[in-house]
């Protein structure tokens, strides 16, 4: 199995999932992430369940090489992260290709960070967990409790399409953004507080303590004013996370993830669980102070924290997602659209989605479609028009599909449709009737420099094409055009980019041009971005086969084969349905 190979293991790098719970009765501790909040975010950014194994890196220095195509996210301590030689941001999902090298420097703020990949690293759990506890020789890559070492292979799956998730600075944990000279930790007093006098407790809560060099995943020893309990010891009992033990020298010890399961020192109380992550990011000589919190207030804060939907705080990088979709939709390069796409300003799909989002509720959106083939209309175009129609309706808009015969007869009665006539400029009439807020052309033939229309074979089809170009030119509103070959409306925006294509190129322009390998796919790409902008899964119930069947029943033909089949430009309906599923995955809406 492929995965990530450890080139340099760093100071201490451990596999950690949520922890090994329910095993105290056999002497096994919980383990798990020291900074649980950063660990959770690493998995959330990768769309993983919380218990998915990650790498916990202490102090830095980890170098990995990828043998898979996947993604990764790094959260926690402030660190320089490089993919190959390029610096990238933490708290962000990044695309990784096989052969890439991932380098984490040494930490500037904090002591621990977390590296997650979609689906997690694949290994066999030990006692229901992959968490590494070196002291107990359990868990981790090979199950023996070992830290990662140079040459280790961390198995994981390939992931080709993921949302461009990131966590904005405003939502990142405060203790990693605004480092304080003294970190305040809240303490819930326990029943053994009775063993500490009022004066001793006052001393504890007023003192400033320093993290000693004797700190690790088992616990943090603190140095400062000595606290003296009224007893020397107690019967050994179970120890919770964050328990504050006071040994004979009076210097408190806060017990953490790899703590022993039982102990016999008196315990003043426990650090509030929401503050453990703050403590876990401190290093030797950094300072802490304690303040009491009632158990009722602690329960209330935990309840409020649990009610927060962490996933709702993460955001998608809209610009990056648009570029990913633009590249994805020309990845097959069926008619040379990769080179054409490269000539467009990046973000065309996002700009188009924003236009639709802004204009849908303002009035009527005209959607022109229909490319004549073999005396009928091709499937590429109407399918995308129907998809856009449904999305605009869901956004509260009023879409109208504009086309000529025979497509008009197929759509009329099922959709709001308007017929345009052959050999007649009806643009003034259409614009007067609808006063559109937005006009879209999807796979409409566009006039060339001689005023005629041509198909991809260079055949003049002017007698079968009504004039939608004039509606695009005369509309007093923004215009969007979509094409996949160079002879469609809108291609006049990029005349120079079409010179190497063996076509009669259209010269009709638009405000925003989008290209794709199949024009219908561009509609799905726009809708995917609309789903992100509106927080609605607008592609969820899309049934490509049903739409093609409807069109086929009304005489549609495949634009490449000229046959009445459930296909689009020679590709089966299942190809488009899979593309829709991939777009949903890219936008974080996949079921």
Image (cartoon, rainbow, N blue to C red):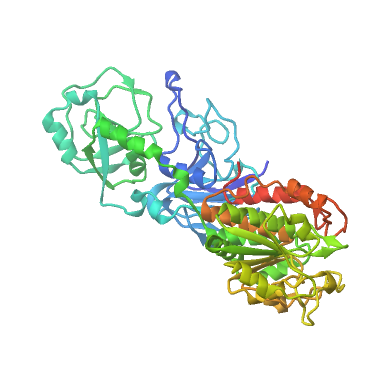
Q: Nearer the viewer, residue 125 or 432?
A: 432
Residue 155 location (% of width, % of height): 62, 41
Q: Residue 303, percent across and down?
A: 35, 35
The x and y percentages for residue 193 are 20, 26
Which residue does the image show at 34% across and 36% down from the upper left? 302
Farthest residue toward the bottom? Answer: 450
Name which quarter of the figure residue 236 lies in: top left
Residue that lies at the very extreme toward the left in this rendered image: 199
Quarter of the image that includes the C terminus: top right
Q: Quadrant of the N terminus?
A: top right
Residue 216 shows up from this direction: no
- Residue 267 point in image, percent of width and height: 25, 27
Residue 520 or residue 326, whichever sits in front: 520
Side of 147 relative to 230 (left or right): right
* Depicted 424 relative to depicted 571: above or below: below
**Foreground pick, 212 / 382:** 382
Q: Residue at x 54, y 60 (%)?
A: 357
Residue 283 against residue 262 in the figure, above or below: below
* Residue 208 visible to an observer of this rendering: yes
């Amino acid at each position: 199995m492929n995965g990530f190979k450890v080139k340099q293991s760093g100071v201490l790098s451990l596999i950690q999932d949520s922890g090994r719970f329910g095993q105290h009765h056999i002497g096994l501790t919980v383990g798990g992430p020291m900074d649980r909040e950063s660990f959770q975010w690493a998995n959330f950014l990768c769309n993983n369940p919380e218990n998915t194994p990650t790498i916990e890196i202490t102090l830095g220095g980890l170098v990995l090489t990828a043998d898979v195509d996947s993604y990764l996210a790094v959260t926690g301590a402030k660190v320089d992260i490089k993919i190959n030689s390029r610096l990238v941001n933490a708290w962000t999902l990044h695309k990784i290709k096989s052969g890439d090298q991932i380098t984490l420097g040494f930490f500037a703020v904090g002591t621990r960070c977390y590296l997650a990949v979609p689906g997690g690293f694949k290994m066999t759990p030990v006692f229901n967990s992959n968490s590494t506890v070196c002291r107990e020789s359990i868990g981790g890559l090979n199950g023996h409790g070992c830290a990662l070492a140079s040459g280790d292979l961390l198995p994981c799956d390939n992931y080709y399409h993921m949302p461009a998730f990131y966590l904005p600075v405003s939502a990142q944990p405060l203790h990693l953004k605004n480092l304080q000279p003294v970190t305040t930790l809240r303490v819930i007093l326990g029943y053994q507080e009775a063993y500490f006098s009022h004066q001793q407790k006052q001393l504890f809560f007023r003192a400033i303590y320093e993290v000693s060099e004797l700190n690790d995943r088992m616990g943090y020893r603190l140095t400062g004013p000595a606290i003296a309990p009224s007893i020397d010891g107690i019967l050994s009992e179970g120890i919770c996370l964050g328990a504050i033990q006071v040994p004979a020298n009076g210097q408190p010890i806060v017990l953490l993830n790899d703590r022993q399961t039982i102990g016999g020192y008196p315990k003043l109380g426990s650090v509030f669980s929401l503050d453990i992550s703050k403590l876990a990011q401190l290093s030797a000589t950094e300072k802490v102070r304690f303040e009491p919190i009632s158990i009722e207030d602690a329960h209330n804060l935990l309840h409020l924290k649990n009610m927060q939907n962490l996933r709702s705080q993460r955001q998608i990088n809209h610009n990056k997602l648009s570029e990913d979709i633009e590249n994805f939709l020309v990845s097959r390069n069926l008619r040379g659209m990769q080179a054409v796409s490269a000539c467009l300003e990046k973000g065309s799909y996002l700009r188009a989605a924003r236009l639709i989002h802004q204009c849908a509720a303002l009035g009527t959106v005209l959607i022109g479609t229909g490319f004549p083939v073999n005396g009928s209309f091709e499937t590429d175009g109407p399918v995308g028009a129907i998809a856009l129609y449904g999305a605009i309706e869901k956004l509260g808009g009023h879409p109208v599909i504009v086309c000529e015969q025979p497509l008009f007869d197929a759509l009329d009665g099922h959709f709001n449709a308007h017929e345009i006539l052959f050999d007649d400029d009806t643009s003034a009439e259409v614009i007067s009737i609808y006063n559109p807020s937005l006009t879209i052309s999807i796979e409409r033939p566009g006039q060339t420099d001689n005023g005629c229309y041509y198909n991809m074979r260079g055949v003049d089809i002017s007698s079968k094409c009504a004039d939608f170009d004039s509606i695009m030119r005369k509309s007093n509103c923004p215009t969007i055009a979509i094409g996949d070959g160079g002879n469609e409306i809108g291609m006049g925006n990029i005349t120079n980019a079409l010179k190497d294509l063996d076509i009669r190129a259209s010269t009709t322009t638009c405000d925003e041009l989008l290209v794709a390998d199949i024009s219908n796919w561009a509609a799905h790409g726009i809708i995917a971005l609309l789903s992100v902008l509106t927080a609605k899964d607008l592609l969820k119930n899309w049934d490509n086969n049903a739409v093609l069947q409807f069109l086929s029943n009304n005489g549609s033909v495949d634009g490449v084969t000229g046959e009445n089949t459930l296909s689009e430009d020679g590709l089966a309906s299942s190809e488009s349905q899979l593309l829709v599923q991939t777009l949903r995955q890219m936008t974080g809406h996949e079921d």
